[in-house]
Amino acid sequence: MTAMSAAPIHRGMNFGFWARAGYYGSPAAAEAVERMADTGIDHVCVIVCVTADAVHSTRQYRDFVNTPSDLEVARIIERIHAKGMRVQLRPMLECHDGLQRCHINFPDDGLIIPGHPFTYWQQWFDSFQARSVYYARLARETGCAVYGLDSELDKTARHHEHWKRVVAAVRAEYKGHLTASFTEGCPIDRLLDDPQCWFRELDSLGLSMYHPLGRRDEDLKGLTIAELAARVAPLVERDRVRAEKLGKPVYFGEIGCCATAKATSLPYYWNHDGGYDGDEQARYLDALMTAYWQQPWWMGAYWWKWEEQNDRPQFRSDPRGDKGFTIHGKPAQGVMQRWYGRPERKA
């Protein structure tokens, strides 16, 4: 990416996180595709959850209950394509012990007691490579424009050589746009300072964007969208430097905020004690789009998320509206339509 080139914007949405087997073949999924197309979305991240028994397990596998079948994944991709949208296929690892992929970590491989080497990372990456290649083939066969190497595997990112061999194996199967996404729990800036950083083997780098716009004790209602956008100006500069070091565009692999009062003070959180507030969520989306949209190195955003597969009763505690991350039928959907309806930036 040169200083004069502008990355094409992905007007994206994350879809199907924790979709159990059968969902992608359901009428509800078909309707979701229709509604996403109506919202101006042009890239849908189709998520397929693969599993591990626990956060310290080295083996990753498809689960008969929690992993959609290849056939239903292929059919929902075909449906998305038929509506004129592109697909990022992204397998995501979930653990049966309830911990998340961002917690995955092991001691470095080595030897302390003669004859008893420990190779947790080697085993984990061997399994990760096998499932990455498997789904890269599915991405190729179904014509996916983008393939995502999971998301938020933050503590794994320092293992450059392991990641490079995974990327090489995936590249042998899939020739499209290759990406991966991380949170601020990953030492992104320190890793990018390393000339051998494996991030440079990718075509773009995704970031999880859940940065607060203010403190919980602040009243943000009186601030304009421009004033809220100005609060993330340091992040825009930070990410500009990241794109410059990477030599590739960066984008939001996830961005989200609940439709709950004060949610912009802790956007990634799901258990706020406030009532429904659709404007809170809409203003968060509007402010971040205002701050980033014109940046030529920014490749767009994938909102977290279109539908809620895991039942959270607290989202339904206010009869005025759903308090969760979803935007359908809320003010944020109109904000998204307005931004996603904008023309492509000029180089």
Image: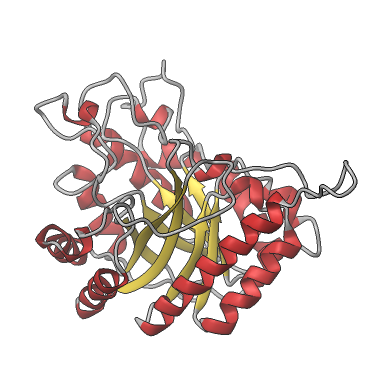
- Observer-nearest of 250 and 315: 315
Residue at point 37%, 44% (across, down): 256
Can residue 98 be seen here? The reply is: yes
Quarter containing the N terminus? bottom right
- The answer to whether one can see residue 247 in this image is no
State the residue in front, 29 or 300. 29
What colouring does the structure picture have?
A: secondary structure
291 over 339 or under it: above or below? above
Most foreground residue, 116 or 272: 116
**Left or right: 6 with respect to 272?**
right
Q: In percent of the image, x 59 and y 41: which residue is there?
A: 56
- Relative horizontal placement of residue 211, taking residue 105 as reference (left or right): left
Percent from the top left, x then y, of residue 282?
28, 42
Left or right: residue 65 versus residue 267 is: left
Residue projecting furthest to the front:
115
Q: Is the residue 287 above or below the residue 274 in the image? A: below
Tell me the quarter of the picture where residue 340 sits. Answer: bottom left
Q: How many marks?
A: 0
Residue found at x 57% / y 46% = 57
Which image quarter: residue 112?
Answer: top right
- Quick one: which residue is furthest to the top in this view? 217
Residue 11 position within the rendered picture, expressed as x and y whole percent measured from the top left = 35, 64
Relative image position of residue 236 (x, y in whole percent)? 56, 49
Point out residue 275 in the picture as x, y percentages from the top left corner. Answer: 22, 22
Q: Left or right? Give the position of 83 relative to 261.
A: left
Quarter of the image holding residue 138?
A: bottom left
